[in-house]
Amino acid sequence: MKFFVDTAEIDAIRELHALGMVDGVTTNPSLIAKSGRDIKEVTKEICDLVDGPVSAETVALDAEGMIKEGHELKKIADNIAIKVPLTWEGLKACKTLTDEGHMVNVTLCFSANQALLAAKAGATFISPFIGRLDDLNIDGMELIADIREIYDNYGFTTQILAASIRSANHMSEAAKIGADVATAPPAVIHAMANHVLTDKGLDAFLKDWEKTGQKIV
């Protein structure tokens, strides 16, 4: 499973990238606002750092506007994935932009039917939002499983990009189901390394080592 980092914070991306934990980056208007930076400036910096796809989101509500904004965003770098919402207008924009040869990430997906439409429209990525479904007491992982089944049934090449990841468990569950990509905040990726038994075991080893009075260096 590919790891995308869901942030516009350059330092966080750089740290994870150095460890080989970054296959791409996703941004959205909220993350750009949180960074406090100009969208084109920060997106260009991310694209220069990361070889993989960097999702930059349109904000227009009509297909014509999304296409126009997509063309502008695409000028930033070759690895831009134009992000459009899963609305009827977004699907129109997806079809046009895909036909032009651009990567398109269709976002805010909450049903298998929506994912099927996005694949038919040629989306490069479909972004089902796990956490937001969980907030409504709906199992977001069931949606990932449903999309995986449908795409496999018909050989769709659209990649399932599990989004709205809230926990390390979300990451492993998405991987088990077969999501192609998961995008998560840096804190969640860091949390994947944590386990209470690892901490306890390390503490015990160090206490025993101290008793030996030895040094390795």
Image: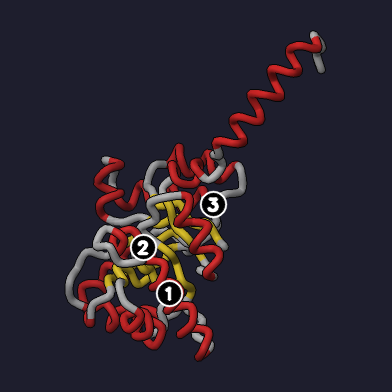
Q: SS of the residue at dot 1?
A: loop
Sequence-earlier tag: 2 or 3: 3
* Residue 93 visible: yes
Q: SS of the residue at dot 2?
A: helix
Closest to the camera, between mark 1 and mark 3, is: 3
Q: SS of the residue at dot 3?
A: loop
Sequence-earlier tag: 2 or 1: 1
Q: Is residue 203 left or right of residue 81?
A: right
Closest to the camera, between mark 2 and mark 1, is: 2
Residue on which the image places disc 1:
102
Residue located at (59% from left, 42% from top): 18
Residue on which the image places disc 2:
130
Residue type at numbered disc 1: His
| Mark 1 and mark 3 residues within 8 Å of each other at the beta carbon | no
Q: Residues within 10 Å of mark 2 (few under 14, many from 20)?
A: many
Q: Is residue 108 left or right of residue 77?
A: left
Residue on which the image places disc 3:
22
Q: Residue furthest left?
A: 61
Q: Residue furthest bottom?
A: 154
Q: In which quadrant of the rendered view does residue 68 lie?
A: bottom left
Q: Residues within 10 Å of mark 1 (few under 14, many from 20)?
A: many
